[in-house]
Image (cartoon, rainbow, N blue to C red):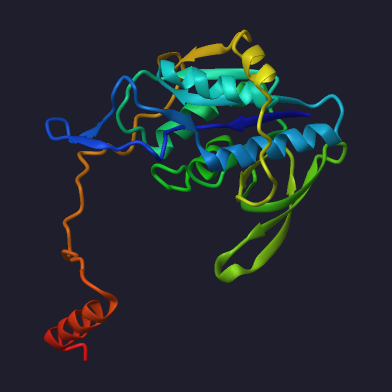
């Protein structure tokens, strides 16, 4: 069984982001820390669990982005992926989910994967669209927010349980090949050992240039982003507990809350 896992690289949540007023885009520094999207870690772990159940299965990890994305794929290899594919897209700015999905579909289509897996969303944009768009572009059945799966390659079928609105669950049967977007909590992503991480640094990655792939013209262009306006200012109440309580009651009266 051939499995493709899409893993995105995102800015680390501990980083302080700055906005370039000239370009209207986020500004990254040479020392900015990037890592694998947490949601995609669950997708990769689920692929590894499927491979453990099905001898002979292989896992390709794929990521789209500039040169720094290779570190993302090194981690995927350290976790256990068999092969890494880097779609080299040097633009640091915004790439819409449709453009990313188009690149992935153009690369994955001729390779005839049995299963394509992605995280349910990305931490930076939270668009929740890439997996579904890949399925649409490749004309494959798709299940989103998957929290449980059973795959039967000999029958070319999969049975998945997915989370739906209101906390409900839905069970669907899909024909393979198919696309899954994986919900967090389906598993516990493994932490690769130091030796595996170091060994993965020596593995060769396949590089595919974005300009060599036949993809549609981008449908969306982000014009700019901005910091939201501050709706209200906060204030600190100082003093002893009794003094704080009195000040708070006075503020409530002034605001007509009490």
Q: What is the x, y in percent for residue 230?
A: 17, 58
Residue at 59 percent across and 12 percent down: it is 201
| Quadrant of the frame with the N terminus | top right
Residue at 58 percent across and 35 percent down: it is 138
Residue at 68 percent across and 19 percent down: it is 196
Q: In this orientation, which residue lies closer to the viewer: 115 or 199?
A: 199
| Quadrant of the frame with the C terminus | bottom left
Q: In this orientation, which residue lies closer to the viewer: 115 or 148?
A: 148
Q: What is the x, y in percent for residue 229?
A: 16, 56
In the image, residue 185 above or below residue 211: below
Pick out the residue farthest to the front: 240
Q: In this orientation, which residue lies closer to the viewer: 190 or 140?
A: 190
Does residue 135 appear in this view? no
In the image, residue 65 above or below residue 189: above
Q: Is residue 26 left or right of residue 195?
A: left
Pick out the residue farthest to the bottom: 258
In the image, residue 230 above or below residue 135: below
Does residue 150 appear in this view? yes
The part of the image, by quadrant, that contains residue 123 is top left
Residue at 55 percent across and 43 percent down: it is 39
Q: Is residue 7 left or right of residue 23?
A: right
Q: In this orientation, which residue lies closer to the viewer: 70 or 177?
A: 70
Question: How many labels sit on residues?
Answer: 0
Q: What is the x, y in percent for residue 19?
A: 20, 36
In the image, residue 140 above or below residue 216: below
The part of the image, by quadrant, that contains residue 30 is top left
The part of the image, by quadrant, that contains residue 22 is top left
């Amino acid at each position: 069984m051939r499995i493709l896992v899409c893993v995105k690289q995102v800015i680390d949540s501990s980083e302080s982001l700055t906005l370039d007023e000239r370009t209207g885009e986020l500004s990254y520094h040479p020392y900015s820390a990037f890592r694998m999207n947490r949601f995609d870690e669950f997708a990769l772990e689920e692929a590894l669990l499927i491979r453990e159940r099905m001898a002979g299965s292989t896992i390709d990890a794929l990521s789209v982005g500039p040169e720094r994305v290779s570190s993302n794929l090194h981690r995927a290899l350290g976790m256990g992926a068999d092969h890494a594919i880097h779609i080299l897209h040097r633009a640091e700015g915004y790439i819409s989910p449709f453009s990313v999905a188009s690149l992935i579909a153009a690369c994955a289509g001729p390779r005839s994967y049995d299963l394509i897996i992605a995280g349910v969303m990305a931490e930076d944009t939270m668009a929740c669209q890439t997996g579904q768009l890949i399925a649409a572009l490749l004309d494959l059945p798709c299940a989103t927010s998957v929290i449980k799966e059973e795959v039967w390659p000999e029958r070319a079928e999969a049975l998945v349980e997915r989370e739906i609105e209101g906390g409900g669950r839905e069970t669907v049967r899909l024909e393979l090949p198919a696309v899954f977007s994986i919900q967090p909590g389906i598993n516990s992503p493994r932490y690769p050992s130091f030796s595996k991480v170091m060994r993965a640094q020596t593995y060769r990655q396949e590089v595919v240039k974005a300009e060599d792939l036949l993809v549609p013209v981008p449908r969306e262009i982000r014009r700019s982003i901005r910091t939201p306006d501050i709706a209200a200012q906060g204030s600190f109440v100082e003093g002893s507990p009794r003094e704080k309580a009195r000040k708070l009651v006075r503020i409530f009266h002034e605001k007509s809350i009490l």
